[in-house]
Image (tube, grey):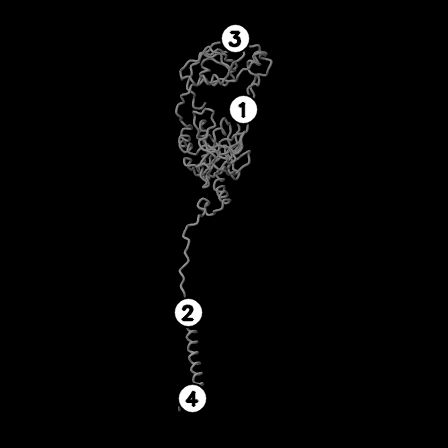
């Protein structure tokens, strides 16, 4: 046995080394495979929870379609069927071009002294506010008209009756004999914002169903030279042209927030509209009484239409004065008419002081009170005459 061990010693040692090497190799292999197969859970990446700024879509949602183009299209589809176009005919009387004082100088037969009449046609816009034919427009669109015709979308024409008018707010209500008409919803003008989008629809220059878009440029504007009146008009850069008067100014929901009224002829992109509140507050009175009862004016009034007389005129006709006020027309039943003033008189003195211009006379009257007496010296029939005028309150319609 011992002999066998020595004989195979090298062989046994080699076999032992092979077995040990195999075991070590297997252990290393399994250890490596185990570490590679093990799933390592990494911490989740930190998420940025800060909200990213986004454009609010609410401001651009107009009905079911959120596009700006379709918003305007939808407004027009909603509003246009209730917008009307108004044609007027009025008889206009023209006074002679030569003042009476010049006629008297040359003699009564030198000029043709008769008044002339002609038919004047006008156009404007309006909108239906009730299905039974009540229509809103501007007073100046139908003022003095002998005939008013309302044209509906689609071509139907109706003779209109004037129900109520108001010169101060430039409002008028018409009525046509029709039923089941489309009409517009009146909105609110108290909460309007500068920069708010608006749409104007009307009949500029006789071009039916013209749509213009713009923004509210300013609020509480006034077109009056008398700053004591205050301002209430809406100013917009939506194009408003002659013929747009009386048409609706609407918001992007199609609700009427103003009544288009006027433009500045010497400026671009400046138009004005009457806030719908003035109509809402006075609509029942306009329909039931035909007028709006404004608070009594406390301003004194003379009641003449006047023009300054210059030095060239006085020199040409050899008048015994250089300055004065030519009376072009006397308002019926006015203080001036009651005092005996006539068209063609030339006022040279007021309260024994020389008067040089109509503006000077107007400023003087503004400082006086109702019931005060005004002493006038006027030139008539080549002689001076004195007139005592008792100032009265200005009527509502003047």
Closer to the chain start, of discs 2 and 3, is: 2
Closer to the chain start, of discs 4 and 3, is: 4
**Residue at mark 1 to residue at mark 4: CA–CA distance:** 152 Å
**Residue at mark 1 to residue at mark 2: CA–CA distance:** 109 Å
Closer to the chain start, of discs 3 and 1, is: 1
Quarter of the image holding residue 12?
A: bottom left
Q: Label for residue 192? A: none
Q: Which residue is mark 4?
A: 6
Residue 342 is situated, as x and y percent measured from the top left of the image, at 50, 14
Residue 236 vertical placement versus 30 (above, below): above
Look at the numbered disc 1 and give the secondary structure of its residue. strand
Tell me the mark number nearer the camera, choosing from 1 and 4.
4
Closer to the chain start, of discs 1 and 2, is: 2
Q: Which residue is mark 1?
A: 92
Look at the numbered disc 2 and give the secondary structure of its residue. helix
Q: Label for residue 383? A: 3
Q: Which residue is mark 2?
A: 35
**Residue at mark 2 to residue at mark 3: CA–CA distance:** 130 Å
């Amino acid at each position: 046995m011992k002999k066998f061990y020595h004989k195979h010693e090298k062989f046994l040692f080699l076999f032992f080394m092979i077995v040990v090497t195999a075991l070590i190799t297997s252990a290393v292999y399994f250890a490596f495979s185990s570490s590679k197969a093990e799933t390592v859970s990494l911490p989740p990446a930190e998420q940025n929870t800060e909200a990213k700024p986004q454009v609010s879509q609410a401001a651009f949602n107009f009905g079911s379609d959120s596009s700006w183009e379709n918003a305007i299209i939808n407004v027009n589809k909603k509003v246009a069927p209730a917008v009307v176009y108004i044609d007027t005919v009025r008889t206009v009387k023209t006074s002679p071009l030569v003042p009476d004082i010049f006629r008297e100088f040359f003699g009564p037969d030198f000029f043709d002294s008769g008044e002339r009449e002609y038919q004047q046609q006008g156009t404007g816009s309006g909108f239906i506010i009730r299905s039974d034919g009540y229509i809103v427009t501007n007073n100046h669109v139908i003022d003095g008209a002998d005939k008013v015709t309302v044209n509906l979308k689609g071509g139907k024409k109706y003779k209109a009756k004037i129900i109520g008018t108001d010169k101060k707010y430039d409002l008028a209500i018409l009525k046509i004999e029709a039923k089941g008409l489309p009409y517009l919803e009146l909105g609110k003008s108290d909460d309007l914002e500068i920069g708010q989008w608006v749409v104007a629809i009307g009949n500029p220059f006789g071009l039916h169903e013209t749509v213009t878009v713009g923004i509210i440029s300013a609020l509480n504007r006034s077109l009056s030279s008398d700053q004591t009146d205050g301002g209430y008009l809406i100013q917009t850069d939506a194009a408003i042209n002659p013929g747009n008067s009386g048409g609706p100014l609407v918001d992007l929901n199609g609700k009427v927030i103003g009544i288009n009224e006027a433009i500045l002829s010497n400026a671009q992109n400046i138009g004005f509209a009457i806030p719908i509140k003035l109509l809402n507050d006075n609509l029942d009175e306009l329909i039931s009484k035909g007028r709006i009862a404004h608070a009594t004016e406390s301003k004194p009034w003379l009641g003449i239409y006047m023009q300054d007389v210059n030095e060239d005129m006085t020199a040409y006709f050899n008048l015994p004065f250089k300055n004065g006020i030519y009376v072009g027309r006397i308002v019926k039943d006015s203080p001036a008419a009651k005092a005996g003033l006539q068209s063609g008189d030339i006022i040279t003195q007021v309260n024994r002081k020389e008067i040089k211009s109509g503006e000077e006379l107007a400023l003087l009257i503004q400082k006086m009170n109702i019931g005060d007496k005004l002493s006038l010296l006027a030139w008539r029939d080549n002689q001076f005459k004195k007139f005592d005028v008792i100032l009265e309150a200005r009527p509502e319609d003047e």
